[in-house]
């Protein structure tokens, strides 16, 4: 009775007939319904690389570091320079910057700033001002000689790199600021530029891409301070080489008041090979955040001083023993090593036994990779006198603009020289007086 009050009889019969029709036409359930498949397991993460170096010959970017081959355009092209440069440029600035970012390339001048990010700062809406690329070839850090070898024996890598980096930033010209004392290196670079102009690789319609790009060489006057990017720009403009206050940064107001990127010789010279082989290839070398290959300058108390290209993160001990013939008198005769040029703290032997040569590993031991200029000191070294000599260098090269540097370098030099003249006992310093 209650059911007929809620649903009229006609409605009840209609619903019942629909239900029976649905049951008659529906497919009977399968005897064994298929089980739901479990989701496929995620692919295992690639194993972490734990061994770094030695670098294979086919992976070397700089193939003429020792001047064994012809560095002119014909010889450079035979070794792979200027190969597919037109195709790289035509792929556009965004593609080039993406490859540089993918490669993990960090600045090779000492600071280690991510190069792809730095170049991307130049990508902005046009405001009527031209953009410039400036190459810092003012290599003056004691112990550093890597850029010198590139300019002397592989200048076309630098010229090709300028074209590709300049196009990525939208620059109309590049200025190569070469240390004044580098006469032969400057001559090689200037000759390479003339060859590239003559072959139509730079200048109007560079490489047939419709992109106009000029390169100029400017010789410095020997001031160490001009290695600082804003002091270098001041010198390029014909002023005294003294650093500017930042901000504004060169990417906003740089050379001649225009957007400018200042970058290192080695950083630019590796860019073409990264674009040819791919950012992933370059990133396959070294540890995370320390990717790629690197030029290392090894000097001091070794059997074979050398500049060599190796994989980032190679152990310091292996680097010296494999390429520099080991420490004079054997590894046990080692006292200390300056791992990245004279401006970074030295490392005692117990740290040198295991440390890796990359940015993060050396920061972790309170030093730095710097320019990767490895200065080896054996147990015959008077460390106090060595530091005093370096202090004299920085006192002499201070531009005198800022009080802490102007006054501080002088006092450091005086203190270290006085310290070096005191009577020393073997128990105090670990080596005989």
Image: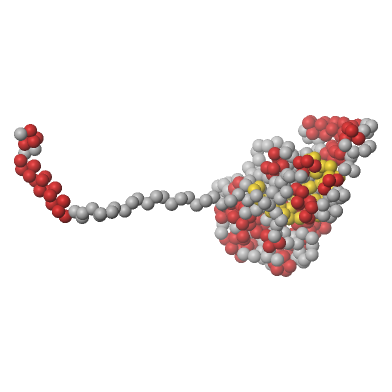
In the picture, the quarter occupied by the C terminus is top right
Q: Quadrant of the N terminus?
A: top left
| Coordinates of residue 275 in the picture (x, y in percent) | 61, 58
Residue lying furthest front: 31
User: Is the residue 343 above or below the residue 207 in the image?
Assistant: above
In depth, the one of 155 and 206 nearer the eye is 155
Q: Residue at x 57, y 60 (%)?
A: 90
Q: From this viewpoint, is residue 63 visible?
A: yes
Whether residue 216 can be seen here: no
Query: In this picture, is 367 found above or below 327?
Result: above
Picture layout, residue 220 above or below residue 202: above
Q: Residue at x 77, y 59 (%)?
A: 65
| Colour scheme employed for the rendering of this structure | secondary structure
Percent coordinates x, y for residue 60 in the rendering: 70, 59
| Image-based side of 223 in relation to 54, left or right | right
Between 405 and 61, which is closer to the camera in this rendering? 61
> 347 or 372, which is in the foreground?
347
Residue 358 image offset from top left, x and y in percent: 70, 46
Which residue shows up at 66% across the image and 37% down it?
Answer: 247
Q: Residue at x 86, y 39 (%)?
A: 383
């Amino acid at each position: 009775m209650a059911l007929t009050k809620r649903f009229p009889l006609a409605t009840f019969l209609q619903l019942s007939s629909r239900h029976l029709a649905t049951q008659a036409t529906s497919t009977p359930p399968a005897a064994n319904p298929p089980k739901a498949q479990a989701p496929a397991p995620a692919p295992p993460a690639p194993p972490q690389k734990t061994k770094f170096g030695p670098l294979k010959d086919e992976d070397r970017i700089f193939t003429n570091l020792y001047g064994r081959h012809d560095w002119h355009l014909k010889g450079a092209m035979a070794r792979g320079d200027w190969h597919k440069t037109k195709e790289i440029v035509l792929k556009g600035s965004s593609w080039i910057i993406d490859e540089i970012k993918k490669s993990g390339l960090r600045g090779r001048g000492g600071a280690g700033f991510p190069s792809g990010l730095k170049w991307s700062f130049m990508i902005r809406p046009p405001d009527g001002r031209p953009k410039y690329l400036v190459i810092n070839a003012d290599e003056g850090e004691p112990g550093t000689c890597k850029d010198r070898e590139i300019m002397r024996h592989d200048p076309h890598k630098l010229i090709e790199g300028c074209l590709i980096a300049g196009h990525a930033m939208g620059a109309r010209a590049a200025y190569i600021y070469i240390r004044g004392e580098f006469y032969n290196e400057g001559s090689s670079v200037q000759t390479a530029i003339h060859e590239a102009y003559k072959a139509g690789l730079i200048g109007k319609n560079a490489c047939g891409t419709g992109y106009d790009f000029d390169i100029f060489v400017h010789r410095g006057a020997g001031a160490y301070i001009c290695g600082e990017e804003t002091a270098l720009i001041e010198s390029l403009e014909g002023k005294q080489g003294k650093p500017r206050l930042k901000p504004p940064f060169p990417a906003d107001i740089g050379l001649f008041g225009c957007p400018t990127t200042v970058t290192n010789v080695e950083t630019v010279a590796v860019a073409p090979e990264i674009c040819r082989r791919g950012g992933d290839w370059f990133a396959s070398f070294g540890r995370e955040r320390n990717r790629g290959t690197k030029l290392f300058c090894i000097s001091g108390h070794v059997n074979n001083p050398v500049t060599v290209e190796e994989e980032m993160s190679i152990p310091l001990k292996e680097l010296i023993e494999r390429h520099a013939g080991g420490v004079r008198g054997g590894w046990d005769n080692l006292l200390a090593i300056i791992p990245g040029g004279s401006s970074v703290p030295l490392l005692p032997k117990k740290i040198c036994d295991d440390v890796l040569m990359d940015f993060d590993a050396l920061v972790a031991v309170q030093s730095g990779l710097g320019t990767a200029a490895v200065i080896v000191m054996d147990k015959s070294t008077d460390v106090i006198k060595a530091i005093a000599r370096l202090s004299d260098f920085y006192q002499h090269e201070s531009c005198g603009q800022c009080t802490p540097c102007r006054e501080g370098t002088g006092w450091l030099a005086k203190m270290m020289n006085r310290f070096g003249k005191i009577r020393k006992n073997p128990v105090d310093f670990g080596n005989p007086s």
